[in-house]
Image (spheres, rainbow, N blue to C red):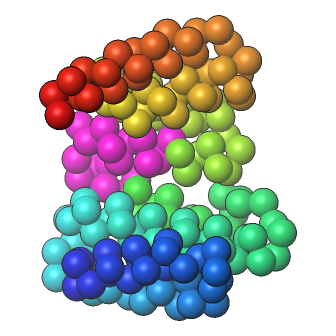
C-alpha cells in the first residue's frame, strides 16, 4: 500500500498543472493507500509523512481552484498537521519530518513556529541541505534578516561537496 500510495502521489504531482481534476483524484487515491499502510503499521513514520504530504498536495489543489489561503483551520491541514506531529512523536530525531512540519507551518503563515522546527531539524542534522536552503529563505525573505546568508553559504558549501563526490 505504501508503494502504491507513493505512485499515486507522484502521478498527481506530474499532472497537477495540465489536469487538476486527475491530480485531485490521484492525491485522494494516495491518501487512501497511505491510510491502508497505517492500518497495518500504525507507527510507520514514512506512511505518516507521505499521508501528510498527499493531504497538503490535495489542499493545494483545492485552494488553487478556490483562491483560498492555506489555513491551519482547514480540516485537511489539521489532519496533515496531526500526522506530522505523530511522525515526530515516533521519531523525534528525524530532521526530515521536522523540516516538513516547519514547511507546513510556513504555508499556514506561522513563520515564528516554522523557525522553531527548522532550527530543531538543524539541531539534529546541521548539514541537512534542504533545511539549510529553506531556513535561509525564511530568514532572508520573511524575516528580512541578514543571518540567512550564513545558511545560504553553508548550503552552497554542502552542495559543492556533494557535487565533488559525484
Quadrant in the picture for the N terminus: bottom left
In the image: residue 146, left or right of residue 69: left
Q: Residue furthest right?
A: 67
Residue closer to the observer: 64 or 155: 155
In the image: residue 132, left or right of residue 66: left
Q: Find residue 51 and report its horizontal and vertical position in percent.
A: 39, 71
Q: Is residue 8 above or below residue 56?
A: below
Give the main secondary structure of the magenta stretch. helix
Which residues, given as a range, are shown in magenta?
A: 85-102
Magenta-span inclusion, residue 100:
yes
**Can residue 39 be spotted in the picture?**
no
What is the quadrant of residue 159 in the picture? top left
| Residue at left offset 73%, top offset 18% | 144
Magenta-span inclusion, residue 76:
no
Q: Find residue 135 and report its horizontal and vertical position in percent.
A: 52, 28
| Residue at left offset 58%, top offset 35% | 113
In the image: residue 97, left or right of residue 58: left
In the image: residue 129, left or right of residue 66: left
Residue closer to the observer: 77 or 137: 137
**Can residue 16 be spotted in the picture?**
yes
Q: Find residue 15 and report its horizontal and vertical position in percent.
A: 54, 79
Q: Is residue 12 above or below residue 155?
A: below
| Residue at left offset 35%, top offset 16% | 157
Amino acid at each position: 500500500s505504501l508503494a502504491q500510495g507513493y505512485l499515486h502521489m507522484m502521478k498527481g504531482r506530474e499532472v497537477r498543472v495540465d489536469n487538476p481534476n486527475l491530480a485531485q483524484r490521484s492525491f485522494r487515491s494516495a491518501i487512501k493507500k497511505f491510510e491502508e499502510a497505517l492500518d497495518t503499521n500504525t507507527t510507520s513514520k514514512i506512511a505518516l509523512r507521505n499521508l501528510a504530504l498527499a493531504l497538503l498536495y490535495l489542499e493545494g489543489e483545492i485552494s488553487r481552484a478556490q483562491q483560498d489561503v492555506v489555513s491551519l483551520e482547514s480540516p485537511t491541514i489539521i489532519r496533515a498537521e496531526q500526522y506530522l506531529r505523530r511522525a515526530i512523536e515516533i521519531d523525534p530525531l528525524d530532521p526530515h519530518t521536522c523540516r516538513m512540519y516547519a514547511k507546513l507551518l510556513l504555508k499556514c503563515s506561522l513563520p515564528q513556529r516554522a523557525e522553531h522546527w527548522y532550527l530543531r531539524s538543524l539541531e539534529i542534522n546541521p548539514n541537512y541541505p534542504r533545511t539549510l536552503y529553506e531556513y535561509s529563505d525564511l530568514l532572508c525573505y520573511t524575516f528580512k534578516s541578514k543571518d540567512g546568508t550564513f545558511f545560504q553559504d553553508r548550503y552552497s558549501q554542502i552542495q559543492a561537496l556533494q557535487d565533488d563526490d559525484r
